[in-house]
Amino acid sequence: MYQDERDSVTNSSLSYDVEQFRNRMAPVLKKYPSYDTMFTLERWLRSYDNDIEEATKRMTRALQNLYALDAYRNYDSAESLNDFLHTINRAADYLPGGIMGPDKHGNIIIVQPMGRARPKTMMRLGRVSDLYRASVIEAEACMYFLRKEEAVKGRQLSIIFISDLAELSLETIYMPAVKAYINVLNVLQYLFPSSIKKVYVINSPNIVNGLFNMVKRVLSKGMIENIEFIGSDWKQRLKDELGEGNIFRYWGGTKEAPKETGTIRMGGEVPDSLKEEILRTLKFIPDDQLIKRTIPASGTLKIPVDVLQSNSLLQWYFTINDGDVDFKITYDEEEEIWPLFRLSTEFVPEYGELLCLQKGTYVLHFDNPAKLFSKIIAYNISVKDPTIH
C-alpha cells in the first residue's frame, strides 16, 4: 500500500523510525486515514527530532483539534474552500488569502495579500475564534492538496507562502488584530509542523520591519530562516522559482482564471450593507443573564458541566473585562475536545456550541495569561438535550 512512498525515503534508519511512529499512531490514524502517509509522518517525526513519544503525543492532539474544528474535508478545488469559508464568516471574501495551486515542482502555493486587509472592520464582524477556525481550515485544505500531489509525484513536497504587503500602511496595522494574527500563527505552527518550505514577502514597505520583529517572537528558527524579502524584481523571481504558468496574472504569471487574481481573496473594504447584515446576526446576552467570576493573575477557572445524555448540545458564551484568556474544553479533564485558543472579546463576545457524543463531565477551562493582573469572566453555559435541538 505504501511501497512507492517507502522507495522514496532513502534513509533506511529514518524509514524504520517512521514505521515505528506509524505503529504507535495506528489507532489514531485509523480515525484520520488521510494523515497515514509516509511523508506526513516523516514531517511530524522530523519536527520533534525523531522523538516518537513526543511526536505521538503532539500529532494525536493536533488531529483531534482538527476534527473538533470540522477541518477534515475533501475539496474539489480552491473555489470549494472559499465557498466553505463563507459558512464560517459571511465576510470571508474580505479576509485576504487563498490557494493558488501547485508550483512547477508540485509544492502548493498560498498567497496572502495582507496589505489589503482591513483589520479594524473585520475584528468587529466576527469572533476571534472565527479567525482561528478559518485559518486552520484553509491550512488543512492546503495540506489536503499537498498530500494529493505527494501521492501523484511519490516524493515529499511543501507549502510555498507568498505574503503580498502592497497597500500596507500605518492605518492598516491595527494592534489588536496583529496580536490575534500572531496567536493564530502560533497555532498553525503547532498543527502543521515542517510544512512551509519558503515564505516570499513582496511589496514590503519600510514600516514592516517593526512588525516583523514582533512576528518573529513566535516563529520557529527554521521558519525564520525560510523567510525571504524580495525587492522590486519579485515578479521575475517568482516566475523563475515557481513557474510562470503557475502564477495568476495579477502577480506576473500566465495562469488562466476568470479574474486576474484567480481564487485569491483580495480583502479591501467591506460594503456597508454586508457589515449591517453581519452585525445583526452576532449574538449578545444581557449582563443580568451572565455569571461573573474573577481569575487571578496566572490563574485558572474550571467550570465542570454534567451532560446527562449523549448527543446533547453544550453551548457557551463569555466576555472578558480586559485583554485575553486561553480557552479550551476537555472531557473529564483529560481529552481535549475543543482546542486551546487565546481569545479576546474586545469587539465581539465569544460563543459556540459542541455536540457531546457521550454523556459525562465536560470542563471549560479559562486560563489568565497575565502575570500581574486579574481578569473578570462573565459567562453563560447551557446544555440542550437531544429532544430540543
Image (cartoon, grey):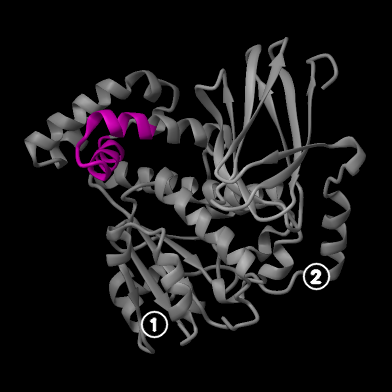
Mark in front: 2 vs 1? 2
Q: Quadrant of the N terminus?
A: top left
Q: Residues within 10 Å of mark 1 (few under 14, many from 20)?
A: some
Give the residue displayed 85% in from the left and 69% down from the top.
272
Kindly tell me whether residue 121 is visible in this rendering.
Answer: yes
The answer to whether residue 39 is magenta is: yes
Residue 244 screen position, x and y as percent: 36, 74
Q: CA distance from mark 2 to mark 1?
A: 31 Å
User: Main structural element of the magenta stretch: helix, strand or loop?
Assistant: helix
Q: Earlier in the sequence, mark 2 or mark 1?
A: 1
Residue range of the region highlighted in magenta in the rendering: 38-59
Quadrant assignment, res 312: top right
Residue 306 screen position, x and y as percent: 70, 15
Q: Which mark is residue 271?
A: 2
Q: Which residue is mark 1?
A: 235
Under circle 2, the secondary element is: loop
Residue 151 screen position, x and y as percent: 31, 41
Give the residue displayed 76% in from the left and 61% down from the top.
124
